[in-house]
Amino acid sequence: MIVLVINAGSSSVKFTLFNMSDGKKVLAQGLIERIGIEGTSMKYSNHKGGKFEQKVQVANPTDAVKEITRNLVSPEYGVLGSLSEINAIGHRIVHGMEKISKPVLLTKEAKEIVRECFSLSPLHNPHNLAGIEACEAVLPGVPNVGVFDTAFHATMPDYAYLYGIDYKWYEKDFIRRYGFHGTSHEYVSRAAASFLGKPYESLRIITCHLGNGASVTAIKDGKCQDTSMGLTPLEGLIMGTRSGDLDPAVVLHIMTLTGKNPKEMDVLLNKESGVLGIGGIGSSDLRDIEEAAGKGNKRCEVALKMFAYRVRKYIGAYIAVLSGLDVLVFTAGAGENSSTLRASVLAGLDELGLTVDPKRNDPRSSEIRQISTDAGRVKVLVVPTNEELAIADLTTGLLKG
Ligand code: ADP
């Protein structure tokens, strides 16, 4: 079964083509970025070693899917004899509200739900839908499957997902915690259980997805019990450019001080905050912040401390939520690659059963691995996430029934 995975964002379309029948092999992958902006370009690589990076004429998602599929069958870079070999397309979709809690075939009704979520996810869902419609136009007749970032979190109990505001806001306007990165949290937690050779449902697991966007999830009985992101991805951890948790009065106070409107506040909190705003060196990349801190930049030093402290605070809270802990997982860009961040998050937590072994933590690796000591009660693992593979797996699973 050949599955094309599409992740359509505001100005980019990322793709991965898998042969699920041949060891889930990646046949080709890449992205088109700066769509609709000056300097649109495409990166492409295939399993035969062919690759290119070049400027392309792509003005919208349909052009992007045309350009991707043209290359998938081109004489020079192609990996398929014909586009009819593609059996399914799996789409990453950010928000499904309470209406979608598992992967779905993107029928007219399902697409209507994606549209209904525009107001809660204005930065993502409209682009996700445009990606679906582009695939329908370019690859007619191929089933499109939606895999939703919010779906894994659908099992949270009401006392975890409700906010402490009048209940009418939930009933009428669906304002509640939804959580995001669900595909990644589920993928790495299941991978952790199989790495340890334990039944998934038997483990209390905390997963820390620490990338540019970052979130922590508490899992018990194979189900999400709580997660740090909320109505939108803004809540919870301090992120690359997002503030994470704030006293809501901070927002009101800044609005009063500056006269900023909600749209401007949205930009301030989502794009200008987090380690970008605290570090003050014009970068949201933790590698740059770590380098500047190493050279004595005090604001970058405190940005790193704040980032790690917030993760640590959520871990502590979720140990209480789960009444203990069996497995802690680090994943995504910073979680997988920054040994100093992991060490800082877990420093001095031996009494909670969390003991990192520096000899296991320090070496770089792209493999799933244990970084806790054998004596430590909690298994601490680094598990590389692979959202594209998870989407391809879920798409295949749905279509095979
Ligand atoms: P995204 O969250 O955009 O999907 P990733 O999960 O790949 O992307 O995370 C990217 C982020 O991970 C970078 O912006 C950077 O902050 C962080 N990161 C990646 N590699 C390292 C590293 N070696 N050390 C520290 N941080 C890293």
Image: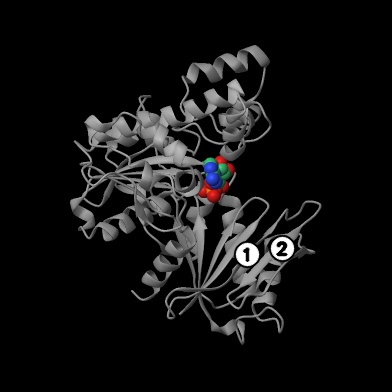
Question: Is the residue marked by circle 1 packed among few (<14), some (14-19), or many (20+) residues within 10 Å?
Answer: some
Please determine whether, in this image, residue 352 is positioned above or below residue 126.
above
Residue drawn at x 29%, y 35% is 318
Q: Amino acid at mark 2?
A: Met
Q: Secondary structure at mark 1?
A: strand
Q: Nearer the viewer, residue 216 or 332?
A: 332
Regarding residue 119, the answer to whether it shows in the image is: no
Q: Relative to 16, is 324 on the left or the right?
A: left
Quarter of the image where ligand 1 sits: top right
Question: Which labelled disc corresponds to residue 30?
Answer: 1
Q: Relative to 324, is 3 on the left or the right?
A: right
Whole-percent x, y for residue 266 in the image: 60, 31
Which picture quadrant has residue 362? top left
Residue identifier under label 2: 42
Which quadrant is the C terminus positioned in?
A: bottom left
Residue drawn at x 23%, y 36% is 353
Whole-percent x, y for residue 342 in the image: 41, 39
> How many numbered circles are shown?
2
Contact (Cβ within 8 Å) of mark 2 with mark 1: yes
Q: Amino acid at mark 1?
A: Gly
